[in-house]
Amino acid sequence: MSIVIKEADLVQSIADAVQFISYYHPQDYLQHLARAYEVEQSPAAKDAIAQILTNSKMAAEGHRPICQDTGIVNVFLKVGMDVKFEISGSLQEACDEGVRRGYLNPDNKLRASVLDDAIFERKNTRDNTPCILSVELVPGDKVEVQVAAKGGGSENKTKFAMLNPGEDIVEWVLKTVPTMGAGWCPPGMLGIGVGGTAEKAMLMAKQALMEDIDMYELLQRGPQNKLEEMRIELYEKVNALGIGAQGLGGLTTVLDVKINTFPTHAASKPIAMIPNCAATRHVHFELDGSGVAEMPVPSLDSWPDIEWAPDYNKSKTVNLDTLTPEEVASWKPGDTLLLSGKMLTGRDAAHKRIQQMLAAGEQLPVDFKNRVIYYVGPVDPVRDEAVGPAGPTTATRMDAFTDMMLEQGLIAMIGKAERGPVAVNAIKDHKSAYLMAVGGAAYLVSKAIRSAKVVAFEDLGMEAIYEFEVQDMPVTVAVDATGVSVHETAPKIWQAKIEELRTAEA
């Protein structure tokens, strides 16, 4: 006998799931990250993890997004063949309606990040639809649902290769991970798909990220097959690269490595690798015809007892309203700063428009002389918020605009992860600096923002130029005025330290 899944139940369950994952980390991720925090020896990495864990609990308490990039929604359905859907349109349309309702919830409105027409218009759909839907028909009379949100920072680090049959998978992963930089916000996990065809490998890699993190348990009991042996080998060797939390150098880069496989053509060995970031977000549930799914609400007691707070003894306080190039030049790589005063914001679209205006000889609507810019696309505020979660954007996306902006008088930039050679050279030439905020701590960072107003390009939505007034916003000097980058130096230092630790243990 077939069961009936009503459209209203499917739509509401997806809407609830979208809200749920915006502010609740999976418990397996939290447990493994807490263990990583306890053993971390790198002060910078330990501080970053503390911010991520504190942010996570704040998001859970406040029912606000863990990360400002509330992602593009992936919906995976395993539909039992005895199931009948009672819906008015297509399955895609029903899932999209669930996403729409979830993202437009007025109590926790999420950031619209999905653009229609990926090539030309790139116009925001304003409700994060459409979702990415994957459907599999299976025996049974239930619908298994997985809902995940994937942000651009981690998705953009996806890698694929068509290896020759004789090429080594471990070697490829270890060669490839350093090319991903830190814009995917480690510590996270790697999902790897091997086999099938190109698109099958990608799908398997994405699905692998939906599995529970169990590396701690696996290490405790030991491997039971070759695939588990490979997972452990990759986990240990990737962490031995010394990349660490946020790329600041440290013991933990990945909490787990998941591998899915499928038979493949004799001449082929397709491999895909997708990371999950510090804002790992997914939930699993079943629909059996009895109504809307219930999400397993975690107890706040399950978060580790870690509360990050500004360290006024260790960190330098900086007044942005009186900041001078001379003070910027005095900062050293790795210095932690607490910023107060007024800063500007701007991302890809704003920088592109500035470029067009300068090329046309037009006057800019904002004076950048001796100002600091924050690469951020914030979530809209709710209730009494000045701004919603406002974590940093992957800064390499602004590399091509860096020299242009520094020519306008800008003296420092704030973003996520590393800068590329073009930006580093421009920073060195202009004796400016690049500061790094912690990706995965968006709600925590937003609490430092006292006021926010749009000062230019209002039509760009979250890509508009804002002026934020901040109080004790935490950042780290990632590139100093001489062009020294901690993302270049720190992983090498920690790679050597990890090797020393291994030698000592042996």
Image: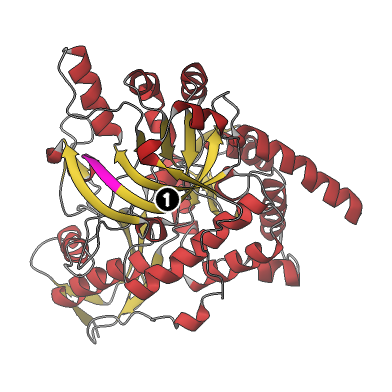
Observer able to see residue 490:
yes
* Residue at (19% x, 35% y) in the render: 122
* Residue at (20% x, 52% y) in the render: 130
Q: Position of residue 291 (x, y in %)?
A: 22, 84
404 sits to left or right of 243: left
**Residue at label 1?**
203
59 sits to left or right of 227: left
Q: Would you say the magenta stretch is mainly helix, strand or loop? A: strand
Residue 289 in which image quadrant: bottom left
Query: Which is nearer the eye, 291 or 395?
Result: 395
For the N terminus, the quadrant is: bottom left
Q: Amino acid at mark 1?
A: Leu
Per the rendered image, the range of residues in magenta is 463-468
Q: Position of residue 125 (x, y in %)?
A: 15, 47
Observer able to see residue 270:
no
Query: Which is nearer the eye, 291 or 143?
Result: 291
* Residue at (62% x, 32% y) in the render: 488
Query: Which is nearer the eye, 349 or 454?
Result: 454
The number of discs equals 1
Establish if 21 lies above or below 392. below
For the C terminus, the quadrant is: bottom right
